[in-house]
Amino acid sequence: MKKNWIDLKKDIEIPESKGIYLAAVREKNEEFQSMEWNAYLINDSETSIEMALIVTKGFDNGESTSTMRHSIKLLPASSYAKIEYLQDEVLRLNNQFSVTYFANDKMYEKTFLFPKNSINEAALKDLPVIKKKGILVK
């Protein structure tokens, strides 16, 4: 019996991603002596994640940024990694981060969204794992 594409698609299981977050952190760039926003992937779980692929883009009302791609080979449990610098010009856009990774021999996928203008100093809060303040999306 042949399976059609729809039947095959139903057989694919992508488990729920837990303990993986994205944060925008305001921090000092020592080299340029300026404050800047940086995006971080946070692993607040008890399991390492492997082969994380992150695709980022900014968009709003027909305006969009270039699509950027990043990878992180290994992100141990209770750790974090810097993904990219966020230019001030893109903070007025919706900023989307699509993350795919492996943990416990399973593939996980999650999309994080910073709504336009949500990355600002008034929204800073304590972050898990990173001992800094920032804006967290779960």
Image (tube, grey):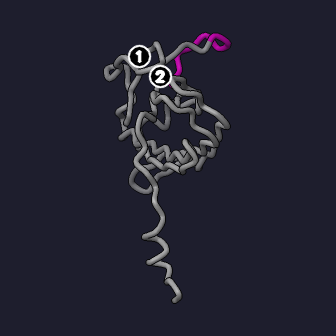
- Above or below, 21 relative to 122: below
Residue 77 x/y as whole percent? 53, 27
Residue 24's x, y, as percent? 46, 28
Task: Confirm or deny contact between disc 2 and disc 1 (CB under 8 A).
Answer: yes
Tag 1 secondary structure: strand
Asked if the stretch drawn in magenta spans residue 2, the answer is no
Q: Which residue is mark 1?
A: 133
- Indicate whether 137 appears above or below 36: below
| Vertical comparison of 72 with 2: above or below | above
Check if residue 32 falls in the magenta segment. Answer: yes
Residue drawn at 64 percent across, 34 percent down = 74
Residue at the extreme bottom: 1
Task: Identify the residue at horizontal 50%, vertical 51% (top origin).
Answer: 64
* Mark 1 burial class by Cα count in 10 Å: few <14, some 14-19, many 20+: some
Looking at the image, which is closer to me, 98 or 50? 50
The three-letter amino acid code for the residue at tag 1 is Lys
Q: Quadrant of the C terminus?
A: top left
Image point (35%, 33%), residue name: 118
At which x and y percent is residue 117?
36, 34
At mark 2, the secondary structure is strand
Q: Nearer the viewer, residue 86 or 107?
A: 107
Could you give the CA–CA distance between mark 2 and mark 1, rounded to whole angstroms? 6 Å
Q: Does 73 sit left or right of 2 as displayed?
A: right
Quadrant hosting residue 48: top right
Asked if residue 70 can be seen in this view, the reply is no
- Pick out the residue farthest to the left: 122
| Magenta-highlighted residues | 30-37
Residue position marked by numbered label 2 in the rendering: 25
Q: Which of pointers 2 and 1 lies earlier in the amino acid sequence? A: 2
Q: How many neighbours does mark 2 have within 10 angstroms: few (below 14), some (14-19), or many (20 or more)?
A: many
